[in-house]
Image (tube, grey):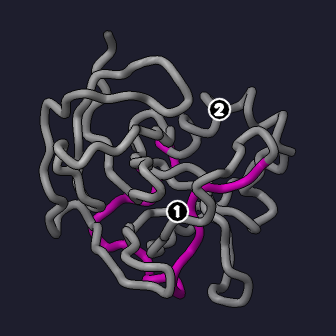
Amino acid sequence: MEIVSNVIVLSIQDGIIYAFSKMELKLYRLRYREELGIEIGMFITFEKTDGFVMDVTTISEKRMADKNDLIRIETLENGPTVCLQAWMVFSKNPSLRSYKMLTGFSDWYGYIRIIEGTMKKRRNFIYAVNIIIDDLNYDQKIGATLFRQHTKYVGKPEDRKYNDICERCERRLKSRNALESICD
């Protein structure tokens, strides 16, 4: 069996745990069992099983997010929600989806739906944005996004280098190129 590690629990709804892997840019759905002791905002490690909703029997590792994880829990109209800080860019390549600036791309979270009128959009700039879940039932193949911008842009991060983030984003975008051609 394959081990999936350092996955953040985004939501627990209707008996399903929704957990996201930053390394794979993938949403996992796990059957919720109270004895596992899982809460939103936790990082977990588990053994992958077959199925759209996985039946996980053990969690080999779990920890609550701390301030270094750039994660906080906010209470919105539909309950507690994980709010994440992401570094986001817009592509310079017209064939990629984030070129149109309706979505940005984050090296950790993939595509992020932008709220119109909340930021001055431009290329060659890194945006630090707070993001929340947009749609847990999203379908990547039709161009939907799992995350959306939550607040106005936070600003240009001082402690990260623009070229490093852009290079990582471009590599992630190129590795998803097959998906890109389906989405545009």
Counting from the top left corner in percent of width and height, residue 42 is at: 23, 55
Quarter of the image that includes the N terminus: top left
Q: Decide whether residue 165 is among the magenta residues.
A: yes
Q: Is residue 140 above or below residue 79?
A: above
Counting from the top left corner in percent of width and height, residue 68 is at: 17, 63
Asked if the residue at tag 1 contacts the one at tag 2, i.e. Cβ–Cβ closer than 8 Å, the answer is no
- Give the magenta range: 143-168
Say which label, 2 or 1, has the lower sequence index: 1
Q: Decide whether residue 78 is among the magenta residues.
A: no
> Which residue in the structure is indicated by mark 2?
176
Tell whether 24 sits left or right of 91: left
Helix, strand or loop under label 2 = loop
- Residue at 76% across, 38% down: 141
Q: Image quadrant of residue 182? A: top right
Q: Is residue 142 above or below residue 118?
A: above
Q: Image quadrant of residue 47? A: top left
Counting from the top left corner in percent of width and height, residue 144 is at: 73, 53
Q: Amino acid at mark 1?
A: Met
